[in-house]
């Protein structure tokens, strides 16, 4: 992310949302978020076998409370709350997601929709919520519109 002030970008809730990013920028993004006192969670999707596994990994990485129901609706509700994880902003890094993304495109679309919905809800409260999918540069080029 040459020439981009990552702190300013991440601090702006109007820009927050779900994005595929160059994997080489993962550390710099996490460091910028940490410098802003944002909560940062890394969700490792290596070997993920489906929706239930992906949801469980998200719940574990974000420390969801006991009331979490373990389905898409519950995920949307939990991401819209985050009272148990107070911070100036939130960054979720979805790493090693390539094989899961390719094997389960419908589930990925659902997850992206839920993450975007959470970003929209938090944006209305002027709170940055980012879901970032670090991918290799060549994959990023393929994903570009």
Image (tube, rainbow, N blue to C red):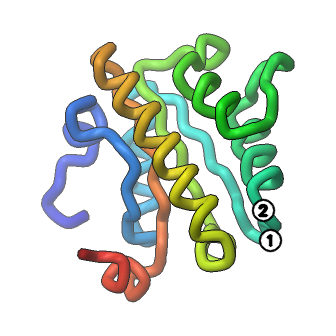
Residue 116's place in the image compared with 39, above or below, is: below
- From the viewer's side, name the closer residue of 38 and 106: 106
Where's residue 128, x and y in %? Answer: 35, 29
**Residue furthest right in the image:** 66
- Secondary structure beneath dot 2 equals loop
Where's residue 12, x and y in %? Answer: 22, 32
Task: Write down the residue under mark 2.
Answer: 50
Q: Is residue 96 left or right of residue 134?
A: right
- Secondary structure beneath dot 1 equals loop
Which residue is rendered at x = 52% and y = 41% of the image?
Answer: 114
Residue 93's place in the image compared with 36, above or below, is: below
Query: How many residues crowd around disc 2 within 10 Å: few (fewer than 14), some, or many (20 or more)?
Result: some
**How far separated are the C-alphas under marks 1 and 2?**
9 Å
> Which numbered mark, 1 or 2, is in the foreground of this view?
2
Which numbered tag is attached to residue 143? none
Q: Is residue 7 left or right of residue 121?
A: left
The quadrant in which the C terminus is found is bottom left
Where's residue 143, x and y in %? Answer: 36, 77
Which numbered tag is attached to residue 47? 1
Where's residue 142, x and y in %? Answer: 35, 85
The quadrant in which the N terminus is found is bottom left
Which residue is rendered at x = 46% and y = 60% of the image?
Answer: 26
């Amino acid at each position: 992310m040459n020439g981009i002030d990552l702190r300013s970008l991440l601090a702006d809730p109007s820009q927050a949302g779900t994005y595929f990013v160059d994997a080489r920028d993962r550390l710099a993004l996490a460091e910028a978020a940490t410098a802003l006192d944002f909560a940062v969670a890394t969700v490792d999707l290596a070997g993920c076998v489906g929706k239930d596994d992906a949801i469980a990994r998200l719940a574990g990485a974000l420390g969801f409370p006991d009331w979490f129901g373990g389905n898409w609706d519950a995920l949307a509700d939990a991401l819209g709350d985050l009272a148990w994880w107070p911070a100036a902003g939130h960054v979720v890094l979805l790493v090693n997601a390539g094989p899961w993304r390719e094997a389960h495109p419908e589930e990925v679309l659902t997850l992206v929709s839920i993450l975007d919905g959470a970003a929209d809800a938090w944006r209305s409260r002027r709170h940055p919520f980012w879901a970032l999918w670090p991918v290799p540069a060549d994959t990023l080029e393929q994903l570009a519109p």
